[in-house]
Amino acid sequence: MTRKMAIIGLIMVCGTGTYAQGRVTFMPFEPFYGVDAQVFSPDPGSPGVEEQGNTAAQNEATGNGTSGVTYAGTPIGGSSYTGTTPVSFSGLGASLYTYGNLFTAELYALSTTTSQSIPPGATLASLSPLTQYQSTFATSSAQFGPGYFDEPNPIPDLGIPGTGYIGSGGKFQTGPAYLGNNAAAAVVAWFNGGGQFSTLAAAQAAGVPWGQSAIFEINNLAEPASVMTQDNNGFPTPPQVAAPFLEGVSDGTYTCLQSFSLTESPELNASQVPEPSTIALAIIGASAFLFRRRKNTIPKGSNNPAQGCEERATLG
C-alpha cells in the first residue's frame, strides 16, 4: 500500500510539473519597483464618478513624475470592524470606510504571451478573477496603513492561466516549453458587507460600492512555488524565478498598479433617505391623530344621528 501511494505521489508531482502557471506578488506597496497604490472612498461631491491614477506624492516617491490625481475621498481602512455581521452599507454612515476588513481587493488578469502589450480594447470584462490573489484592507497603521490592501499568502499559488511553462511530460524531455510570462491585469475592490459579498459580481448585483484600477501590464511572471518542472534528465526541479510585483512594460511604456477610488450607485444614495414604508406609516399616524381630534369635537351625550352622520361624512 505504501509503495502504491508513493507511485501515485510521484505521478502527481510529474503531472503537476507539466503545467506551471506564472505567479505574481500581490502587494500594493513596493516603491523601489514603482508600485505605491491606495484605494480611496468615493468623492463625497461626486460619489458616482470613479477616479484612477496615483497622487502627486506617490508619483514623486516612486520616480513616476511630480503630478497626479487629487482624491476627495479618504484611504479605505485603518481600523477593524468588530460589530455584528453581515453589515448594511447604509448602516454605518461616514465611519464605513474606516473598516478595512469590510472591503476586499482582488487581482483580475489575462495572459498576453505574444508580446509585452495590453490587448487593444482590453476592459475588466476581458480579464478573469484570480481568487488566490484576494485580500482585505489594512485594519491598523501597521505594515502599509489605510488605503492599502494586505498581502495574501496563497497556498497553493496557482498563478495566472496561460502563462508560465509546460513540459512535454516525457522522461527525457529537452526542457519545459515556454508559454510566456506577460499578463494584462487590474485590481478591483468592493464592499464585502462582513462576508455577504465574496465576489465582485455579487457586490455589483447588490449595488454596493466598488471600483477598479486602470489596466496595466505585468512582466516576468514566475513559476508557482507549489509546482516543479523537470530538468533534461526528467528529474523535478524547484522554481528558479522570483515572483514579480504589480508592474511591467507595455509597448515600451512603464506600467504598474495605480491608485483608484470606489463609486456609490444612485440607488445607494437614495436608500439613505426614509423608505416609502416609513413615510406611509407617518401619514397613517397623522391621519389617525386628526381623525381622533375631529371626533372629539362632537358634544358629549349628543343623540342626534344626523349630526353623527354629518361628522362622518365630513371626515370621509
Image (cartoon, grey):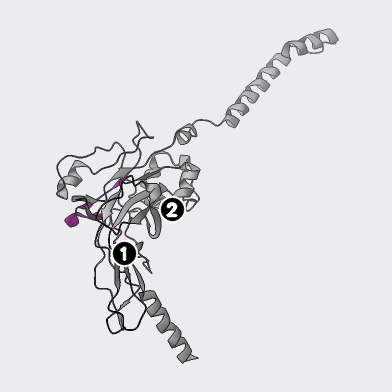
Cβ atoms at labels 1 and 2 below 8 Å apart: no
The residue under the point 35% across, 41% down is 41
Q: Nearer the viewer, residue 185 or 306?
A: 185
State left or right for residue 295 relative to residue 76.
Answer: right
Q: Residue at label 1?
A: 23
Image quadrant in which the C terminus is located? top right
Q: Nearer the viewer, residue 308 or 155?
A: 155
Q: Nearer the viewer, residue 33 or 306?
A: 33
User: Please, is residue 45 above or below residue 195 in the view?
Assistant: above
Verify whether residue 262 appears in magenta.
Answer: no
Q: Residues within 10 Å of mark 2 (few under 14, many from 20)?
A: few
User: Please, is residue 180 above or below residue 93 in the view?
Assistant: below
Q: Residue at label 2?
A: 82
The residue under the point 80% across, 8% down is 307
Q: Is residue 160 visible?
A: no
| Residue 227 on image: x %, y % | 35, 74
**Label 1 is placed on what type of residue?**
Arg
User: Please, is residue 298 above or below residue 72 in the view?
Assistant: above
**Label 2 is placed on what type of residue?**
Thr
| Residue 256 on image: x %, y % | 24, 51
Q: Which residues are magenta?
A: 22-48
Q: Is residue 113 visible?
A: yes
* Foreground tag (1 vs 2): 1
| Residue 34 on image: x %, y % | 19, 53
Verify whether residue 46 appears in magenta.
Answer: yes
Q: Nearer the viewer, residue 283 or 27?
A: 27
The residue under the point 34% across, 83% down is 171
The quadrant in which residue 161 appears is bottom left
Residue 203: mark = none
Q: Real-space Cα distance between discs 1 and 2?
A: 33 Å
User: Of label 1 and label 2, which has the lower sequence position?
Assistant: 1
